[in-house]
Image (cartoon, rainbow, N blue to C red):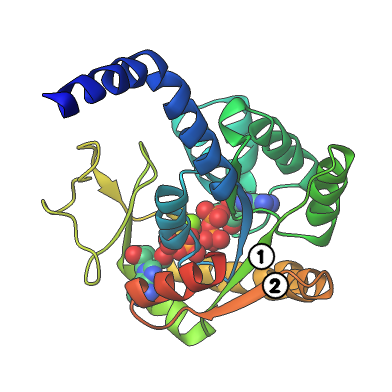
Amino acid sequence: EVQGKRLLPLCLYIAVFKNTFLDFFTMQKGMVNSMKVIMLGAPGAGKGTQAKMIAEKYGVPHISTGDIFRANIKEGTELGMEAKKYMDQGQLVPDELTVRILLDRVAKDDCKNGYVLDGFPRTIPQAEVLDKALSEINDKIDYAINVDVPDENIINRMGGRRACLSCGATYHMVHIPPKKEGICDVCGQPLVLRDDDKPETVKNRLDVYHKQTQPLIDFYNAKGILKSVDGTVDMKDVFAAIVAILG
Ligand code: AP5
Ligand code: MG
């Protein structure tokens, strides 16, 4: 009975201050989770696959410029029409347009604890604009993770990939098939072979990658934040290697 009497005030205390406790712990969690990560890697290296897993584990948004463009193409917006001209050829969308979209996106409220950027930056000028925008608010990127996969493996993967243009989920006919053939597990929409996953376009995308994006590996290495992981192993093992880096 004495114990009961002691517990009662404690319970009342917890009931009254519960939200304060929760806020405190959420804040702590937010602080621990606060991280800004860039995914580097060739087209089809698994940037999107890993970025989604990182976003889920660390509670930060996954931001893919490719997904943003594809959503706009699907909705038939002006931005979508402009981006499609380049994407269908396997070329990069001009920096000016891409940078504007990305900076708008990372300024949103859900990015205050960090984010995973997938497919941005893709050129040195894009990386410099991002750096400058972050340093103006006393901020910086924590890690640039390079998912390393040789060109030979890429060609195979792309032909098997199926994408949901509604929610951005990605599948592979052999490695990660959807529960129901041709239908997205997440939103029930039909899965498609992306227009730019046709073999001749994949080759262009690889050329563009080597010329314009690969130099970013040296760029982030010089800043001391580059980490490379072997992207040819099972995706769970790729993720384990990334978690070992991010902590
Ligand atoms: P974007 O959408 O970014 O395409 P990408 O870089 O070509 O990369 P992908 O999305 O094709 O591959 P991924 O690395 O995400 O691999 P995924 O996880 O899907 O960009 C498309 C276009 O938009 C660009 O070409 C450009 O025109 C434009 N664009 C976008 N951003 C731009 C920017 N910043 N500047 C200018 N233009 C821009 O995996 C691939 C497949 O492999 C999947 O089927 C997956 O299931 C499978 N897979 C993944 N991991 C593994 C594994 N470990 N083992 C076996 N299979 C795996
Ligand atoms: Mg992707």
In x, y percent, where is residue 61? Answer: 51, 41
Give the residue type that dot 1 points to: Ala
Vertical comparison of 179 with 200: above or below: above
Mark 1 highlights which residue? Answer: 144
Residue drawn at 16 percent across, 25 percent down: 2
| Quadrant assignment for the N terminus | top left
In x, y percent, where is residue 90? Answer: 59, 60
Q: Which image quarter: residue 5?
A: top left
Q: What separation in Å lies between label 2 and label 1 (alpha carbons)?
A: 5 Å
Give the residue type that dot 2 points to: Leu
Vertical comparison of 159 with 51: above or below: below
Q: Nearer the viewer, residue 166 or 129?
A: 129
Q: Is residue 135 left or right of residue 207?
A: right
SS for dot 1: strand
Identify the mark at residue 226; answer none if there is no mark: 2
Identify the mark at residue 22; answer none if there is no mark: none
Q: Is residue 37 left or right of residue 99?
A: left
Look at the numbered discs 2 and 1 and tell me whether their residues touch, using CB distance below 8 Å.
yes
Residue drawn at 31 percent across, 50 percent down: 192
Residue drawn at 86 percent across, 45 percent down: 135
